[in-house]
Image (cartoon, helix red, strand yellow):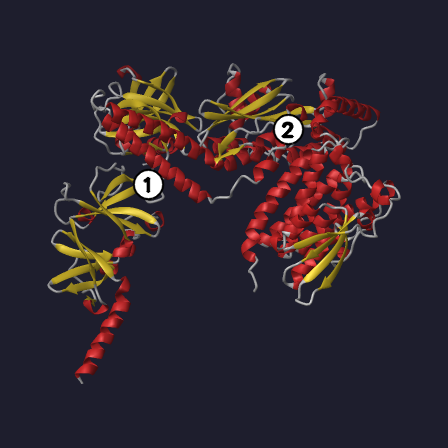
Amino acid sequence: MTVDMSQFYQVFFDEAEELLAEKEKLLLAVDVSAPDSEDLNAIFRAAHSIKGGAATFGFTDITEVTHMLESLLDRIRKGEMALTAEHVDAFLAAKDILKMQMDGHRQGSSVDQDAVSSVCQRLHALSQDSAAHAGSAVQPAGQPEKRATGTASTPTQAASASRSFRIELPEVPQRDVDALAAELGLLGEISQSVLDNKRSVFTLATNEKLDDIIAICSFVLDPDDLKITEETASAVAQPEADTAPPAMPESEPGYGFFEPLKSEIEKKDTSATEQAAAMPQSAHQEAETAVSVEGKPFGRRAADKQPATQESSSIRVGIEKVDQLINLVGELVITQAMIEQRTGSLDPILHERLLNSVGQLTRNTRDLQEAVMSIRMMPMDYVFSRFPRMVRDLAAKLGKKVEFITRGAATELDKGLIERIVDPLTHLVRNSVDHGIEMPDARRAAGKDEAGKLILSAAHQGGNIVIEVSDDGAGLNRDRILAKAKQQGLPVSDTMPDAEVWQLIFAPGFSTAEAVTDVSGRGVGMDVVKRNIMAMGGTVEISSAKGYGSTMSISLPLTLAILDGMSVKVGEEVYILPLGYVIESLQPTPADVKEIAGQGQVVKVREDYLPLIPLHKIFAIEPRYTDPSQGIVVILESDGKKAALLVDALVGQQQVVVKNLESNFRKVAGISGATILGDGGVSLILDVAALLRSSRQLTAAPIFS
Amino acid sequence: MSQTAHTQTNAALHQAHSEVSGNEFLAFTLGKEEYGIDILKVQEIRGYEPVTRIANSPEFIKGVVNLRGIIVPIVDMRIKFNLGEPVYDQFTVVIILNIAGRVMGMVVDSVSDVTTLSPEQIKAAPEMGTTFDTDYLIGLGTLDERMLILVDIDKLMSSAEMGLIEEAAA
């Protein structure tokens, strides 16, 4: 029987990708001078699982790299070799290679073989190199090519083998037997024989526990089919077995690592300063020191321990199933609202029991809705975890020292938003490292710590999530921004409040960077950042103090599906305005409304003349009022442009569930979506940006005609 | 001999049956004419509910309604094909269609029944005489005294003329 393995590829890729990300996170967090044994084990496990998976699917290139990685890691975690910064670098490089190979298998993208072999050599060199340090008892690990023959065993493992197992396999293809033999060969000395009924029997002399053997076998076959018996201690056990340090890292009490931490950091800090004072170390290494200190004082480590236990208690579900569930619950909420509305008119005394039950239903539905909505929520850690590496690499490239700190990584956000926030956030972080944080000597001259602090934080604030990127760098330069704005012909004045000046950097093509680097400074980007965030219904604010750094805070709604809306009425129709665009609403006096020949009307609001957009004209509605001084104008702002929208009346403010109009219909100009009101009716959500654009076209058109 | 004839008719019947197993049509009326559409395209039949008008869309697109949480456009075929003055009362019927994964509603005067038509009962549509462009017709179905105008609803609803679907409208 042949099983089509390709159907499982996607599962392997998904899993391997997660493992790689996890590994990278752990590597970046690991303290080189005093690695936590739990972390090393976790890194090792990740490499091992990828290897197992890759071997099963026959991705030999991935297997080779992971094998080298694994054998090196294995020795580090067993304490046979000390972890150095060099190792961390090599491991990170290997991670990138694995990612590339995986993409190669998955999407057929090209794999840079030179890079692969250079990383392999690097890993190999490290394992050779360490053998010299590690003393006579330890010998270099076997090379992967040798391992592939299936019966290779490393002298180290054989030497420390103290137990012998007899493993009887069920009838499986020879390929699986070979794979298993190779796998088990890593644990100790293995010999293989075939029983008369085509079943294979391994005899394994090893130091490992029975559970580990079963775990390895279960990659290939059902552990229940195995027959494993322990035989008497084999003769291969040698005196050295006792001296082998198998449990050294494990015996270290896991809870103790917080205590020595402080002194550790202090020690590092002083040593780093000393180094820098004595002779400028390579920037790469300095940056690394800084990053490796990252996060620890804030207990991130403690939080990182949890995923291992969470893994087993989660299931993978297709996103469309979740969305369907959310839709159905949304429907239930509306039905419930209808019932509530209809029972509201009943006599509370006569129908007491019915009304009680309706109240109960209301509470239950609300809880259910909250619970269902939370399924789509993902922790910000998903986004944050990719930044330590980026900051580390960037800082190294720029020769800066950056201490990267994340806070509130457990804050949850809608999955759809999480995916869309990555790009803008990446941009802001890059900007902070590139422009915000100064070079070490400049910082020293300013009396600041050489290592700049870059803090990425997330927190809930009301119905919003606020994500902040803040640095303690030079801050924004007000004069330079103003000068540049004048140069670009933007309308600015020297007396503008700071907040307005900072907003200027979001103008298209605006950059104050003196030199364009390949990191940032080309002047594209900040406007895109702002536009992306606006598109998600969020806002960006900047606060900055010269010499003390700057903070960009992004405020986003918790989920794309819910929008804070203001309902307005024109004639008999009710429309929803996204509250984010609304500045104020007012009733103008007749004197404030001016006619501009052939170009419609403008409304004077304090000092500004804003174009008047009569909603009834755009949507061809029979309105109650055509005179702006009788109706209400709502002042809207989008892309820095303001306009006044004329409506009959304001109805109220409410959170609405956004429904897509295009899923069953085409796009409608001026409408961004629809929502279902409490009475089951549909109300359309206005596309404010498009309305403002069309109003400009409206007023511009007569000039050319 | 009579037996052979019998077997023949049986075979013919059988053949017809297997061929038309999908050819069930929902019959509805628009004005004075009776139409039929493939039953498999029909999701459900509902009464007419007040719609939310969509500005600047053709008159036959009545607007959108909430169908159990999804927003569904409603078109009135009577307006589209100029079949008298449309009346909306408790007898007005909306056929909810599911076409190419999209859900839409179609207002008609009434729905009568579901009929099975064999290929022999379906005649090619004449080049004239109906309000529908022959491009959108499958043919004419004859059933005793009745004649059904069989509409290729898929083609009609995704046509640029209806403007219901973006790609076609653009």
Q: Mark 2 points at which residue?
A: A302
Q: Nearer the viewer, residue A555 or A552?
A: A555
Q: Name the residue under label 1.
A: B70
What secondary structure is found at the residue carrying circle 1? strand
What secondary structure is found at the residue carrying circle 2? helix
Identity of the residue furthest to the right in this view: A136
Please give the chain letter of the residue carrying mark 1: B
Q: Distance between the residues labelled 2 and 1?
A: 44 Å
Residue at figure coordinates x 27%, y 38% from the top left? B54
The reply to whether residue A560 is visible in this rendering is: no
Mark 2 Cα shell of 10 Å, populated few (<14), some (14-19), many (≥20): few
Task: Select label 2 or label 1 by which is in front.
Answer: 2
Label number found at residue A658: none
Residue at figure coordinates x 17%, y 83% from the top left? B2
Q: Where is residue A481 in the image (x, y as percent from the top left)?
A: 57, 23
State the image quarter where residue A85 is shown. top right
Residue at figure coordinates x 58%, y 49% from the top left? A13
Judge left or right: residue A279 versus residue A610: right
Q: Position of residue A581 (x, y in %)?
A: 40, 26
Q: Position of residue A248 (x, y in %)?
A: 78, 36
Please give the chain letter of the residue carrying mark 2: A
Residue at figure coordinates x 59%, y 21% from the top left? A550
Q: Which of A557 and A149 is in front in this view?
A: A149
State the image quarter where residue A293 is shown. top right
| Quadrant containing the N terminus of chain B in the rendered view | bottom left
| Amino acid type, mark 1 | Ile
Q: Nearer the viewer, residue B37 or A26?
A: A26
Mark 1 Cα shell of 10 Å, populated few (<14), some (14-19), many (≥20): many
Judge left or right: residue A210 versus residue B64: right
Judge left or right: residue A140 versus residue A295: right
